[in-house]
Image (cartoon, rainbow, N blue to C red):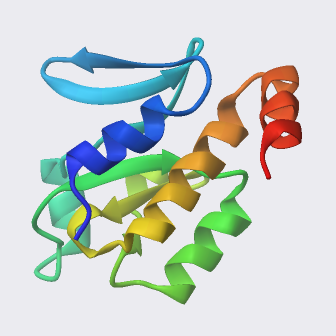
Amino acid sequence: MATWDDVRRIALALPETNEQSARGVPRWRVRDSGFVWERQLRRADLAALGEPAPVGPIFAAHVPDVGVKEALIADDPGVFFTTPHFDGYPAILVRLDRIAASDLAELITEAWLSRAPKRLARAFLQASP
């Protein structure tokens, strides 16, 4: 089971990433762009999701495009989901207590790549094995 410490460790290992807190809610940014953040379900989210609304820790992550988001949800709806608030927006909601550690690292890295400046992302990819 993944934890907030895992999210923090993975995100902060990426170049030029910092952690900020807005009203006590953590979020991770590359330069000035957020790429992963804690996302508690709001009243409208709970109403839209109904009784099967997930409980437990949830975070949001940017994805390259809405097609990737839809593919992730179709592939593993027990981990990935969305709400009407995110319709048409390239971000996905994730049940932290259900995502595998390897998938967490890949998702956070992809979120970082989707928001990092192009030169920084290119340098990171060139330096990666």
- Residue at 65% x, 51% y is 110
Question: Could you tell me how many numbered marks the image carries?
Answer: 0
Residue drawn at x 22%, y 46% as measured from the top left: 4
Observer able to see residue 83? no
Q: Would residue 115 be found to the left or right of residue 79 on screen? A: right
Residue drawn at (35%, 72%) of the image: 99
As drawn, 128 above or below 106: above
Res 10 quadrant in image: top left
Above/below status of 23 relative to 56: above
Foreground pick, 101 / 41? 101
What is the x, y in percent for residue 125?
A: 82, 42
Residue 75 left/right relative to 97: right
Q: Is residue 48 above or below residue 109?
A: below
Expressed as whole percent of the image width and height from the top left, the position of residue 108 reads 52, 49
Please state the horizontal and vertical placement of residue 91, each as a whole percent of the image. Answer: 53, 50
**Quadrant location of residue 98?**
bottom left
